[in-house]
Image (tube, coloured by chain):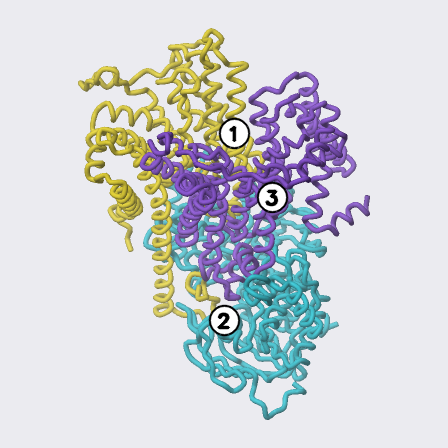
Amino acid sequence: MNTITRRWHEMNSWQRAIVAAAGVLFALSITRVIADADDLTSGNTFIATVGTAAPILAVALGGLYAERAGVANIGLEGMMILGTWFAAFAGWQWGPWAALAGGAIGGLLGGLLHSLATVTFGVDQIVSGVAINFIAPGVARFLSSEIFVGAGSNGEGTISASPNIAHSMGKFSVPGLSDGLKSLDEKRWFFVSDVAGALRAFVDRMAWSTLIILLLVPISVYVLWHTPFGLRLRSAGEKPSAAESLGVGVYKMKYIAVAISGAFAGLGGAWLVVNVRQYNEGQTAGRGFLGLAALIFGNWQPIVIALGAALFAYGFSLQEAVGKNPVKALYLFIAAAFLAMCIALMFGRKSWRAILGLAITGVGLLAYYFNTDEVNRQFVYITPYVMVLVVITFASSRSRPPATVGLPYRRGQVG
Amino acid sequence: MQTTWTKKVGDALLAPAIAVAAALVVSSFALLVSGHSPIAAYRAMGSFVASTDSVVTILNRGAPLYVVSLGVAIGFRMNLFNIGADGQYRLGALFAAAASSAYSLPRPLHILTIMLIAMAVGGAWAAIPGVLKVTRNVNEVVSTIMLNFVATGLSAYLLNNYMRNERVENVVETKSVPKSGQLPSLNGLIENFGFHFPRLTVLNGFLPVAMVVGIAFYVLIWRTRFGFDLRMTGASPFAARASGVKPARMIITTIVISGALAGLASTGFLLTDFIKYNETFPLGLPFTGIAVALLGKNHPAGIAAAAFAWSGIEQASRGLLDEKIPPEISRIMLGTLLMSSVIAFEVVRRRNLTNAVRLAGLQAVGRAAGGPLDTETQPPSPAAGATT
Amino acid sequence: MTQAPTTSPPAIELRGIVKRFPGVVANDGVDLTVAPGTIHAIVGENGAGKSTLMKTLYGAHRPDEGEILIAGQHVTFKSPREAIARGIGMVFQHFMLADNLTVWENVVLGDEPGTKARLDRHEARTRLRDLGARYGLRVNPDTYVSELGVGDKQRVEILKVLYRGARIVILDEPTAVLVPQEVGELFTSLRSLTAEGVTIIFISHKLDEVRGVADDITVIRAGRTVGEVKPRDVTARELAQLMVGRELPKPIPRSDAPSETVALRLSDVTVAGVGDLPALDRVNFCVHHGEIIGVAGVEGNGQTELLDVIMGLRPLAGGSIELDGRSINDLSTRDRRDAGIGYIPEDRHKDGCVLSAPLWENVILGHQGSKPFSARGWIDRVAARRRTKDIIADYDVRTPSADVAAVALSGGNQQKLIVGREMTSGPAVLIAAHPTRGVDVGAQAAIWDYIRVARTNGLAVLLISADLEELIALSDTLIVMLRGGIVATLDPNTVSIADLGAHMTGAADGNDG
């Protein structure tokens, strides 16, 4: 036991992420065998997961920059909406790659508005974020009414949908690897096929837009932890007075960070647009908020954030999956996880209330699992959100947000 | 130095004036760029809104909006950001609708109990993020947003499986609220004074409810000990704690009241124009309520102005269709109004603070020059010595 | 000192420095000469003007009069950065460190090795290790600052200024936050710094420590230099006398005696601290009705924790607190207030009042649970306004009206309002921290009179103050706090300033024992 914990502490975050993912995958393999739900770990599910995770991840990484610089960004959803509109416009005019750039620019404008309000004028960060979430759909709708209505080769544009983007962005598969993993995946061997399925998600029919967002994870690690810029940005969120006293332009750092934040959120919006080659009103469907949740789950660390986004996306992907009701199998998995935690806590002699709560929930889920043929559609819908809520509830007590998130900073102020 | 009444009002109106001016500039600019005449637009809006029918619509929409905004505002007053009014409102409406037909009571009691059910459900749903915040330190912004999604799924589940009116085949909806549970219209009352409504124009009976809630909000916040504790917590959590306020209890009480008001707001539609809960039930209201609370600076009078101005602009924008101007310009107007308001509030607040601190500094100097100077050198006060 | 040739100019010379703030002259003609490569201590009471002087030297503000010479050259600093460029670095008492950043990140911030595109982390760590080895300031570069103890944090602060090439390091009360063992380590480090030719300015009021480490001592009192001494030539008692500079006033003799009934009793009260050391360690004392117990002590020796635990703002780790013979361990802050404990907090801006609220609401604050301000949950605004007007008149609060926000009042007037609020609520026990801090002399005398009269009428007062004059003038008994415990119980009628200073600074053991 001790060697395991020691090994864990010696690992870097990448290694930990891989080990954690492998552990979860192993448990899922057992579950899918018991529950006879192949789609719980099939390659198609994982491919869908990575795709679904991409926009959430982009937003969450955007939130990371802003919050690391000490600016809470509830406005991510709004910036994402601006991203979708500008992506659609640019995509309609100049094609899918321009859509990505357009989305980033749209989000960036939202980010600049947020920094104008919060950094220059010192408006409460939550208030400004809420305002941006309100403004963005209005702006998008007005612009649509002016530009999209009746536009497009077939006049398909309306006030709530853009003209189609002529070309799709295209996907790539790694030759050889994708086919090999696919056949392995389809064998449905215990664990081996599941690993193959998970790996397929990264080599089989991956959209370029997804790849770009995935690359933002290592890029963000590098920028934030391996450049002077990143150090200064983080110091602006941790102890702005100290940063200022050492010659760091805190306002400038916050401006840049929030602008990047908006651009990433916009890029996430652009992913949605490029994916279906069209802007639709309400397309973001709260992904900006899910990104925020992934950020908190990820404890403001890019790699953990990526895992969080994947976790939430997995919940959504199972809804789309066909076959023997994988969400039901997921309930079995969650029930088992709860009961396992319950037992672990009993050995650790933690609070009895927590143990009781876990036990009741776990047993309840088990009872539901054995008494239900098919999980209700609405339950399937709320499952990922409840997962977010539960995960955040457990993560919050150990979370270490940047020290000054949410607090206004005025130059020359002590603290 | 004496604060006169006129100066107070002037100060209070300064920020809104700046915000309205900014909103007009931005929306005029947007109109010009898109090739429309701002003058024509504002004229069309003005003439459309100046009809009995429009005014009644504004009042009918504004009253529930007002109540939901008050609910948001009570949380904001102590820096508790309940973004979950959406779910609280939705579940309140659903349960109230489903329950209302299950029993019968004489009219005033029936109405009252339906309202209480909506408030209880909204409050209970709001208690979840409150408890999570107090016990697990879960940020209420994220938890309330997640609970909004859960409420959406949960309400659909309950409606489909338990609360549906089985006699209607092709629409999923609850039974109608019985007559005895519906709020009477105010037409009859007002026509007693000689005013006549156009045909089909009905002024809903929720308006007096909203007024009562507004007054109750004011009394609660400014006249009771609870309100005192709440305002002090919002202004200075440390001083409030030192004065004996219990933070955990404040958080839970406040968020439950907030949720209860969201639930109550839903009855403004449920017991008047809509009488059953289904797909068409107006669900966007709580989202707007957040904006209205911010615009009204979390004060019942300000929120009243904001709520009716907001529904006024929305209603007026329908007049733009005749001029072939997209009514969506109202969204730009409202959006800039909101953003410029929160900025203007903050700028004016800081200006007042700086003035007050400067005043304090001058007093200190005046005393030092005139009165006996303490032999012991005092450390400079934060206000006067903020030199770095 | 030994390695400084007498011919070289002083590392620092300050001549006639005057610095005024609105209403206050913080420095009134200070002279200071510091020889290169020495440890130079500056001692003085709280508020004597030491920190203001150092901020002047560090470029945080400019003096109104006087001149600064560094190595014989005239300089004027517009900002701390110019001071750093001249090799002057300051280590503040309150650390300027980011907890969630590592040690090396905190040190190199703003002056990072490597290129714009790549921070050379290896180089950063190497440089830090080299600096640490050279000056004997060893800290693991990769530890997060949040995981460091206070002593290590201080080393990081010193490394920060050395990394930027400082040759003169100012330390503002560096030992105030350290436990004795850490103090020893710090002094060893300071010695190795001077061995490398670094000049140290050391601000303190812990006299025994100063005598142990400094080469020279400059004493400042009321904004003026009052003496320059060598540690060998002076005892801690003499130094304390020099620092305070006057005989203490005799307490006004009282005709009556305190009652026999105990109002407030603390038994073995213990409060957890940050590390292993408790913040309060088995504190015992009681306050009788009609008695004033004065708590003397250098700030940061457990006074804050004592206030908090009595008011129920901090959990009790052990022991019990009784009010009139009844345990209040389980009572909430409000219940304690309603049971008759009045409270004048240390930090009036943070805990004592709500700056944005009008005066009449600030008068309710803390008493919103009881009459006359509230009944059955309702706030009585009329009674609050009436009480506010009374306080404004009786306590000489200078304000245009009861309706202005508290922020518009000067600090002294805010304090008078708070004192008035607590006194007029008719408490059985008053917990008063620095009740006259920042108020003018006339109002101070008035507040003292109010407290004396209330005491005569049976009020029990626990008085915590940094103002020795106030403690002596009011207290019936003095207790001295040091490192979370009570180290002495003294009679204000007979105590000498040297004795009091010795107990407060922990010098009593060394000199008397």
Rounded to the nearest angstrom, the CA distance separating label 2 from label 1 is 52 Å
Residue density around tag 3, few if under 14, some if 14–19, many if 20 or more, within 10 Å: many
Nearest to the observer: residue C215 or residue A186: A186
Q: In the picture, which chain is purple?
A: A
Q: Residue at the spot x=56%, y=86% of the render?
A: C10
Disc 1 chain ID = B
In contact (CB < 8 Å): disc 2 and disc 1 = no
Amino acid type indicated by mark 2: Pro
Is disc 2 surrounded by few (<14), some (14 to 19) or many (20+) residues within 10 Å?
many
Comparing labels 2 and 1, the label whose residue is closer to the camera: 1
Q: Nearer the viewer, residue A366 or B11?
A: A366
- The numbered dot on residue B197 is none
Mark 2 — residue? C80
Using the image, name the chain to which the residue with label 3 belongs. A
Q: Amino acid at mark 3?
A: Ile
Q: Chain of mark 2?
A: C
Along the line of sight, the residue nearer the viewer: C68 or B383: C68
Q: Residue type at mark 1? A: Phe
Q: Secondary structure at mark 1?
A: helix
Out of B74 and C316, give the one closest to the viewer.
Answer: B74
On residue A305, the disc is 3
Q: Nearer the viewer, mark 2 or mark 3?
A: 3
Which chain did the renderer colour cyan?
C
The residue lying furthest to the left in this view is: B194
Query: The residue tagged with tag 2: helix, strand or loop?
Result: helix
Q: Which quadrant of the structure image shows residue A238? A: bottom right
Residue B16: percent from left, percent from top? 30, 44
Asked which secondary structure carries label 3, the reply is helix
Q: Is mark 2 in CB contact (under 8 Å) with mark 3? A: no
Q: Does C508 sit left or right of B138 as displayed?
A: right
